[in-house]
Amino acid sequence: MCKSRRRDDSYSSTEWSEAFTLSVSNQPRATLTAGTTIITVGGSVTLTCSVQSSHGWKYEWFRRTQTTYEGKIRDQQNRDIRVSEGGIYRCRGTRGNLVYYTYISDDVTIEKTISNKVVVKQQPNWPQIFRGETITLTCEVQEGGETTEWWYEWRGPSTPTQWTHNNDVTFRVSESSSGDYMCKSRRRDDSYSSTEWSEAFTLSGSILSKPTVTLQPSWTQIYSGETVTVRCEIQGGEGAQWTYEWRAAKLNTPPTSNEYRIIRATESDSGGYSCRGRRDYFFSEWSDIITLTVLYKPCPVLTVSPSWLSPGASVTLNCEVEHPSAGWSFYWYKAVPDLSQKSSSYELLPDGNGTANNSYIIHGQTHTAGYVCGAGRGDPEYHTDHSQPKFVWSADVHSAASLTVSPDRVQHFTSDSVSLTCEGKFAEWRVRKFSEDGRLSDCSRMTGSTCDINPSKSDIAVYWCESGSGEFSSAVNITVHDDGNGPILVSPVHPVTEGASVSLSCSLRTQQILSNVFFYHNDKLIQNDTRGELKISAVSKSDEGFYKCQYSGRESAQSWMSVKVGVLCPESSSLPVWLIVGLACGISVFIIVLISFYHYRKKKDSGFISPMTTTNHVVNQSEIHKHNCLDHGAGEIQDITYSVIQLKHVGKKRKHHKSQEHTIYSEVKVGDEEKSSPAASNEELYSEVRLESSLEDIPTYAEINCHNKAKAKENQEDSPTYAQVNRHNKRASKNNQRH
């Protein structure tokens, strides 16, 4: 409190003032605050200095850096100031005439952002990083930063780094190191001026898969001479620059690429192959081992079905490659005999060039033939060897080439001598045999067109002829038996024509004619009497099958007897021809019977035979002949008369067949109803029927015997009569016709 008094009146004073309370505090500390501590490029920040709960202050501002002393900022006494430089800032308050200072504020660091940009770069610059690899991240200052010395700071998944003069960090990638990485830089001469943080660089440490070894083509089993590529593949590491290491069966100089090409593989290339990848000092795991097997060059195995041809049957060829594997195409050939080279050449079958199917069907095969197959695969195509030839055999006799066997039977003793003769209009021949053990060979004792063998067990085989022009004969089975006491079956080697007669017999090595022989057909007893032969007068298809004989309790081996369909004119294919031939034969026989009866009666009455005529046939006088033949029994003359009948074939003719003239005779034997005198002569009548046709015909004879009801004398003979059918080519000249 206070009071006053006047100077001129010492005893006059005022009252005491009201009390004024003075509170004395400790020396205050100024407080410095900043709106932000980062100055953006081209910007500034506001700093505020304050003294709590007091007034009348003025302020002093101070700035320093790591390289400069603290200095007072001139002309700055305001509470708020704006600064555009980085550094460490402080302030304090002042007031009063006798300047009173507060304590100086705490430091506030202001950083200035400079315009240079920084980026994080990875070395090696692989798009995919695998755990376990070592990488380096580099903080690079752009836009002129190359000439300035910088400090660097990093932020990453782990604790941020301190400022360092190194612009890169190197570490081993692991699961914990995956994440975002950023960096910034500051100039070494200005610790409070720095760049902005870089854009985040994301590091993903992938798990590297185990490499795999693959083969192209993908066959683990290949053949000698094939080409294969062994490839190392790293899943997920396609973009990386790998160097490869190999463990292989045969690699004197291991490759460093991901492919290893084996050209013309050999057996030594067989074995296990594995690989791994390497990038700098980082290695992948070793792959699993893949085993490659190299086999010898394969020889396909060809089978044919059936082995023996049946009329109208198709032949199926099957080709199998040893050690079956994938990717094969098949080639089909016909074997053509090449006697000059003692081998065969191969002709590609129609549509037989590289089929995907390993079977091939041949339709309409009628004769013995040989076939071969081959296979190929890959690119370029690798070809196997050709298969061994396999044959399909025909038992039917071929008109161009045929085989005869002497003696004419299937079964032979080891003591026999057997000749196989090739027949046909060819200069060169060879006889081939296919043994029971599957071996194909040529006859070793060939003289001209005949092969001579002294049979042994090794000669049990199928035999056929091959000509120098590529023709095949029919094939025959030859079996050999060395049982000295056992019998063999004597049966024909060639098929028997339906309608023909055949005899089967049983023979011993020491005795060819036997009696009391049992005969079996397909293991069924069919004859067990005293006869030594089995005679079939008219063979039918039902007689085909296996036959064997039994003598004195010992059986022969069984043999197959084949029956083929009989054809009157084998090369005719036109039904009207058969009708005309049949009618011609029937009519001619009928006419001959009538003429014979008339002639016989006439001769009996007058002893003179007149020429025959008929209104149904064109008869040329020059075609009527009389012949006198001595009857050796009676010494009398027999009269023979010919009548020519010409018929024209109206069926379609084949242009490529050469027309030939053939004759069919029908013989009519006529006897007197009454008892003939010893001097009576027999009469032979011939009727000739000529039929024009473009087909080749074969002479056929039909014999008709008409006997005298009365008993003829012993020296009297029946009269044979023949009907002759000739078929002519229309193009044949009249001079070539028979008259």
Image (spheres, helix red, strand yellow):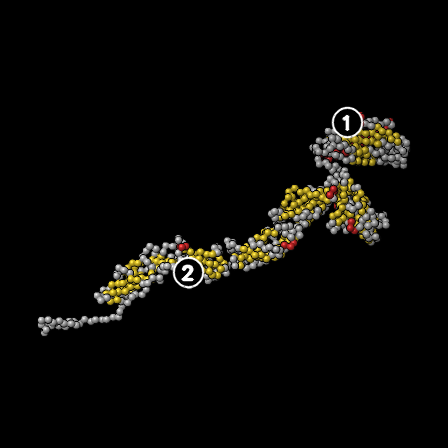
In the figure, is residue 638 to the left or right of 337? right
Report the Cα–Cα distance between label 2 and label 1. 128 Å
| Corner quadrant of residue 651 | top right
Q: Position of residue 337 (x, y in %)?
A: 72, 42
N-terminal-most mark, 2 or 1:
2
- Name the image quarter holding the C terminus: top right
Residue at image coords 24%, 67%: 100
Tag nearer the camera, 2 or 1: 2
Residue at image coords 48%, 61%: 172
Residue at image coords 82%, 31%: 685
In the structure shown, which secondary structural element does the residue marked by tag 1 occupy?
A: helix
In the structure shown, which secondary structural element does the residue marked by tag 2 occupy?
A: loop
In the figure, is residue 531 to the left or right of 221? right
Q: Position of residue 576 (x, y in %)?
A: 71, 34
Q: Which residue is mark 1?
A: 735
Residue at image coords 79%, 32%: 724
Q: Which residue is mark 2?
A: 165
In the figure, is residue 158 to the left or right of 600? left
| Corner quadrant of residue 399 | top right
Q: Position of residue 457 (x, y in %)?
A: 79, 51
Q: Is residue 115 visible?
A: yes
Amino acid bearing label 2: His
